[in-house]
Structure formats: structure tokens, C-alpha cells
Amino acid sequence: GGGRGVAEGEKQRGSVLDREHFVHIQVGCDGCGAFPIVGPRWRCTQCPEAIGYDLCDRCHRRGPGLAGRFNQQHTAAHLMEEVPPVPTWLHILASHSNEDIESIAHLIDLASADPPPPREEASPASGSEGGEEPAEGGAGAGAGAG
């Protein structure tokens, strides 16, 4: 019946918000360069740089001694913690649509881009398509009483 399709759709929409599929918008992996990090994200609690030090789950499992891509002072002795997924309006929108976050973000970029220059339009069609009729009580109506 139709109920099974609804359950599958709910599962698909919910996956955008779960830990394994969560997209950490504007955060890249300092190990492999994946951007954005999708799935579990790990952040160093001790790196002093403002940009911090982040790893995807795959790089985190490889070991804590990976050098940063931006000369961070990260060492294998630093403590890493998992960053919990924090949904944004973009995640919520994706969870209620059939689009993924990357597609929605691309549409937003397109919508916010400078509009193309106006096209030169062809001259308006001559003739009266709408059948314009004179207004009631026109200028000459009722004139001449005197």
C-alpha cells in the first residue's frame, strides 16, 4: 500500500539530519581536504588558531597525528572531540524536500547572483487582444445641458 512509500520518504528526509549523513556546512577536513565534511566531524580542543583543526571521521580513524593543511600547530597529543550536528535552516529545508543540501545551496547561489542584463523585447503586438472597451460615462456623456 501507500503507507510504505511514506515511511521510506520519512527515512530519506530524516537522513539529512542524522550523524552519518550530516553536512557540516563551510567546514573542511584538515587531513584529506574534503569540503564540506559529511558525517561525523572531529575538532581539536587545543589548537590555538582561529581556523581550528577539523577532521572527517575517516581521517580521525587514521590517527590524530595528521598535519594541518594551513600550518596549524596540531600535534598527536592534542585532544579531539566529536562536534555534534547542529542543524541550520538549510538542513531543515533539505529534510523536508527531495533535494540534498548541496543542490539547495547551489539554487541559493543562483538566486542571489547578479541578475542577467535585461533582454531587448520585441515590439508589442499590434491589435487589440483584450478587446478594450470605452469607459462608461466618458467625456461626452451628459454634456450639453443648458
Image: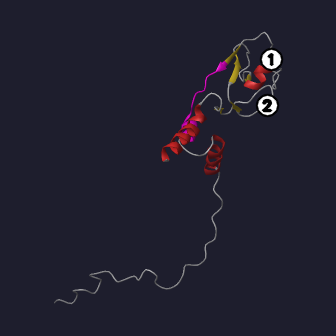
In the structure shown, which secondary structural element does the residue marked by tag 1 occupy? loop
User: Which residue is depicted at the point 56% across and 37% down?
Assistant: 11
Q: Is residue 124 rendered magenta in the image?
A: no
The range drawn in magenta is 82-95
Please report whichever mark, 1 or 2, sits nearer to the chain's N-terminal start.
2
Q: In the rendered image of this protein, does residue 135 appear above or below residue 71?
A: below
Which of pointers 1 and 2 indicates the residue nearer the eye?
1
Q: Quadrant of the rendered structure where residue 85 is?
A: top right
Identity, as a three-letter code, of the amino acid under mark 1: Gly
Residue sitting at the far top: 77
Crowdedness of circle 2 by 10 Å Cα count: few (<14), some, many (20+)?
Answer: some
Q: In the rendered image of this protein, does residue 27 appear above or below residue 114?
A: above
Residue 13 is marked as: none
Crowdedness of circle 1 by 10 Å Cα count: few (<14), some, many (20+)?
Answer: few
In the structure shown, which secondary structural element does the residue marked by tag 2 occupy? loop
Residue 33 is marked as: 2
Real-space Cα separation, disc 1 to disc 2, in angstroms: 16 Å
Q: Is residue 86 rendered magenta in the image?
A: yes
Task: Give percent across and percent down for residue 43.
Answer: 70, 20
Task: Give percent across and percent down for residue 117.
Answer: 65, 61
Residue located beneath label 1 in the image:
63
Front-lying residue, 74 or 9: 9
- Residue 79 placement, left or right of 127: right
- Residue 146 placement, left or right of 32: left
User: Which residue is depicted at the point 52% across and 43% down?
Assistant: 4
Residue 141, can we see it? yes
Q: In the rendered image of this protein, does residue 82 appear above or below residue 15?
A: above
Q: Quadrant of the rendered structure where residue 119 is?
A: bottom right
Residue 56, can we see it? no
Residue sitting at the far left: 146
Task: Give percent across and percent down for residue 61.
Answer: 77, 20
